[in-house]
Amino acid sequence: MKNPMLSFPLIHRLAVFFVWLAALTCSSVSFAHRGPADEVDACNILVGHERVHFTAYTPEHSHNKGYCEAIPTVEETNLVFDYEGKSLRNLTVEFEVTKEPEGTRVFYKEPTKIKSGTVTGDVDFRDYGAGEYLAHVTIVDEGERLDSHIPFSVGVEEAHKVKFPTKTLLVLGITAVIVYVLKRAARSPLTTA
């Protein structure tokens, strides 16, 4: 006699569950940068009424992968500030990166109009060490200064490496429980009322 626990509807439901589970655990944030308008992007700095997108690249470690909140390694880093609108291109803007809490300047771009909308610079964080930093974007207009900043860390954490084993262990644990329940159900005698 066929065990109803192994019938097509149950197997179908398990297949859908496993596809859902795999999609949930293996997906990454699809709008990590420049996502929907209502999504919070930790890589954006609001400067006045415009947004500036901050990205850091570590060519020795990750080649083309961009970071903003946590740069995983202490090395030569390419910093990129991109205007998301056009109005900042007509204003004088200053760029600076400081190590906190000391406030030591590690990068500076004097106040100027950036018509291209992109500012780049290189910082060798080996000269300053791991720690907390602030990227400052300041509008300088007729003696007035409007400073905005975004905090980030260098060499302090590697969030992407911590999450992968946790997700993998979760999937393996759930799979083991499901296999155990199915095997136990297959061994139990079928009872009819």
Image (tube, rainbow, N blue to C red):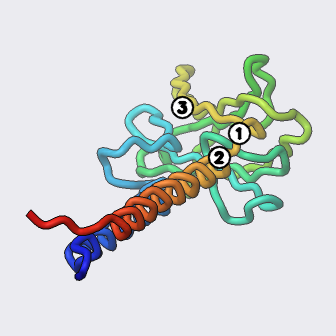
Q: CA distance from mark 3 to mark 2?
A: 38 Å
- Residue 67 image point, x, y percent: 63, 50
- Which mark identifies residue 157? 1
Closer to the camera in the image, 59 or 15: 15
Query: Could you tell me if residue 119 is visible in this image?
Result: no
Picture quadrant of residue 4: bottom left
Judge left or right: residue 118 versus residue 120. left
Q: Earlier in the sequence, mark 1 or mark 2?
A: 1
Q: CA distance from mark 1 to mark 3?
A: 31 Å
Q: Residue at x 39, y 55 (%)?
A: 35
Q: Amino acid at mark 3?
A: Ile
Outermost residue toward the top in this view? 102
Q: Where residue 30 sits in the image (x, y, percent)?
A: 43, 60
Measured along the vertical axis of the image, is residue 15 above or below residue 56?
Answer: below
Q: Are discs 1 and 2 less than 8 Å apart at CB?
A: yes
Characterize the local packing of mark 3: few (<14), some (14-19) or many (20 or more) Cα atoms within 10 angstroms. many
Distance in Å between CA atoms under marks 1 and 2: 9 Å
Q: Mark 1 or 3, which is nearer the eye?
A: 1
**x, y (%) of residue 17?**
32, 65
Number of residues whose C-alpha sits closer than 10 Å to that of mark 1, classed few (under 14), some (14–19) or many (20 or more): some
Q: Is residue 49 above or below residue 171?
A: above
N-terminal of the two: label 3 or label 2?
3
Task: Label 2: state its secondary structure.
Answer: helix
Q: Judging from the image, what secondary structure is the residue with disc 1 in? A: loop
Judging by the rendered image, the residue that carries numbered circle 2 is 162
Image point 49% across, 40% down: which residue?
Answer: 42
> Taking the image as drawn, is residue 79 in sight?
yes
In contact (CB < 8 Å): disc 3 and disc 2: no
Q: Amino acid at mark 2?
A: Val
Q: Which mark is residue 139?
A: 3
